[in-house]
Image (cartoon, grey):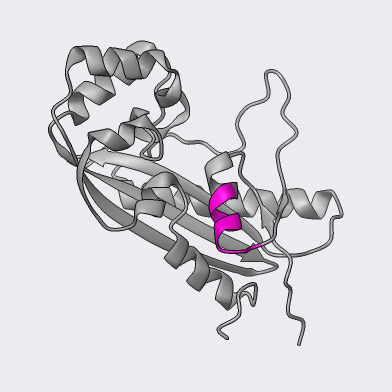
Amino acid sequence: MYAPRHLYLASRSLRRRELLKQIGVGFELLLLREAAGRPPDVDEGVQPGEDPMAYVQRLAREKADIAWLRLCHRRLMRHPVLTADTTVSLQGEILGKPGNRDEAVSMLKRLSGTTHEVHTAVAVIFDRQLETALSSTTVSFAELSDEEINQYVASGDPMDKAGAYGIQGRAGAYVKSLSGSYTGVVGLPLYETDQLLRRFTIRSSA
């Protein structure tokens, strides 16, 4: 029986790369060839009636399907491909990545003093086998002053992150409590990822 041990990571996230290395998983990057004016490969718009958990799982699956097609078109060695997607939801509303400074400020003001959820879906694909896992974590934020929000936004850290914050950076000081997976909030839940990779023999149970 063929047991692939190599892994492709189809993500530009430095955080996901660091987390995979943390659990000793070797990988090779499989990235898009970006071109100016090229439409996104995955439509990140929310579909009618789609809740945050269904949304993030759909994006992870679609990213996996596209990554596998890319691998085949490039005639690369066939090994499992891992993709992931993270979103923040507040009272059922999806908060994606802010498009500009004002959106980042608005999101952080809404999260201030509230409890929200962070959902991260992980997908692994190999030939016709596509497996997914979902991590959902509840996060409670402290009350943030306008000055704190403005200083954090000015740092640039919120601009490429769902919900306009990264828990592994200075925004970690805003988190009063967390119930679930810290690494899931960072962007790759390690327990769920490990269990998923075992199904593809990337990780050994020994």
On screen, 135 above or below 106?
A: below
Q: Is residue 22 magenta?
A: yes
Range of residues picked out in magenta: 18-25
Residue drawn at x 31%, y 46% is 118
Give the tally of numbered discs.
Answer: 0
Residue drawn at x 62%, y 37% is 41
The answer to which image quadrant residue 80 occupies is bottom right
| Quadrant in the picture for the N terminus | bottom right
Q: Residue 62 location in percent, x, y?
A: 55, 50
Q: Residue 84 location in percent, x, y?
A: 51, 50
Residue drawn at x 67%, y 18% is 37
Q: Please give left or right for residue 134 compared with residue 128 in the image.
A: left
On screen, 162 above or below 99?
A: below
Frontmost residue, 46 versus 97: 97
Residue drawn at x 32%, y 14% is 151
The answer to which image quadrant residue 3 occupies is bottom right
Q: Is residue 155 magenta?
A: no
Q: Residue 190 location in percent, x, y?
A: 46, 61
In the rendered image, is residue 95 in sight?
A: no
On screen, 63 above or below 171?
A: below
On screen, 101 above or below 142?
A: above
Q: Residue 32 location in percent, x, y?
A: 71, 38
The answer to which image quadrant residue 103 occupies is top left
Q: Please give left or right for residue 60 compared with residue 47 in the image.
A: right
Q: Please give left or right for residue 30 compared with residue 162 in the image.
A: right
| Quadrant in the picture for the C terminus | bottom right
Frontmost residue, 9 versus 46: 9
Frontmost residue, 12 versus 186: 186
Main SS of the magenta part reads: helix
In the rendered image, is residue 156 in sight?
A: yes
